[in-house]
Amino acid sequence: MTTSARSVGGARSRRRSLRIPQRVTPRRGRRLAIGLTLVALVSAGGCGSDPPSEGADQLDGIDAELVITRQRDLLDRGLINVMTDNGSGHDLILSHRRLVADHFATEEDPGTTSLRAGRRVAIQLPYGRADDCESDSPVTAVLSFDYVVVGDTADAPPATGTVDVGGTDILDGIRAKQCAAVAFDASTDTTITDATITPDGTVAARLRIDPTPTADGSALTVERADGTILVSVHTDDGSVPATVPPDGALTIPITFVVNRCDPHALAEVTKRYGLDLSVSVDGAPAQPVPIDVSPLFDDLESIVERCRDASG
């Protein structure tokens, strides 16, 4: 069973318009509440992210939504922007911030955020790892944090708040990708062999996919292969789509081709080399599955350098 972040936040939290708190939850009390909640979940057989503390304020006047901006490398680093609008009329300081989502295991971020009245702030938080690949229900989430109201008495301890988060279809997509990668990695051994640098400045290799003895019988179909902005990946005509045979290896000839080697691209790109297989599991929509290409880094660096020298 997966704990629903929204249902936990709604059922156990008090919705309130933000005022200078009359009753606050000190940090010590928050830890105790989390501990009691965890005991209850374990006893019930629950899984997924820990819910926000009991007694947390579900705040009105604060809106939060997940967005993907031009900083797409954030997702590669395990982070996502939580666009947070403060319509409460109070300047706030947020700490112990965390994106709590069902079907995901997430971690608290130790940083702080100054959220002034009437302002919109992008809070970058870890989106975590999918820990439930069985449920068909969509992801729901809340933003959990401790907060103090700027101008409140200096010795007032922080209160704990939660805000429902929109845009969680992004987490649905992340979960689908992670679960596809887990299924692929559990069912196959994948290696890149016979890599050579060709006279025309490419790297030719063979991708071999073997089913593991512990494979669960899922039908895995490789639909295409993709590289990066710098170096793309091509497959031989007719080699994909192809399904991994249950009792034999699937071999796909691949070629790494330099797309760009200009100084701007080399300076700005955050992921120089990579290989993503677009994999369908049991007929589901295909998802990108990353393949380790670190053994090829020297060869790939060589063909990029050759391109740069040739372009002056």
Image (tube, helix red, strand yellow):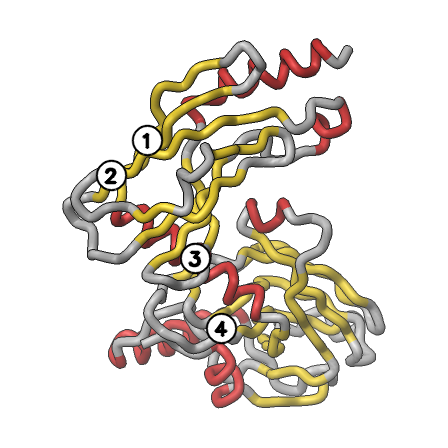
Seen at 61% across and 85% down, the residue is 23
Tell me the distance, in whole angstroms, between the alpha carbons under discs 1 and 3.
Answer: 25 Å
Q: Residues within 10 Å of mark 4 (few under 14, many from 20)?
A: many
Q: Is residue 150 left or right of residue 159?
A: right
Q: Is residue 307 left or right of residue 7?
A: right
Q: Residues within 10 Å of mark 3 (few under 14, many from 20)?
A: some
In x, y percent, where is residue 19? Answer: 74, 85
Tell me the distance, in whole angstroms, between the alpha carbons under discs 2 and 3.
Answer: 26 Å
Which residue is tagged 4? 139
Seen at 31% across and 75% down, the residue is 46
Point out the frontmost of discs 2 and 4.
2
In x, y percent, where is residue 165? Answer: 61, 74
| In front of the other: 18 or 272 | 272
Q: Residues within 10 Å of mark 2 (few under 14, many from 20)?
A: some
In x, y percent, where is residue 285? Answer: 45, 61
Point out the frontmost of discs 1 and 3.
1
Label 1 vs 4, first from the N-terminus: 4
Which residue is tagged 3? 129
Label 1 vs 3, first from the N-terminus: 3
Residue 210's tag is: 2
Label 2 vs 4, first from the N-terminus: 4
Tell whether label 3 touches label 2 (CB within 8 Å). Answer: no
In x, y percent, where is residue 184? Answer: 33, 49
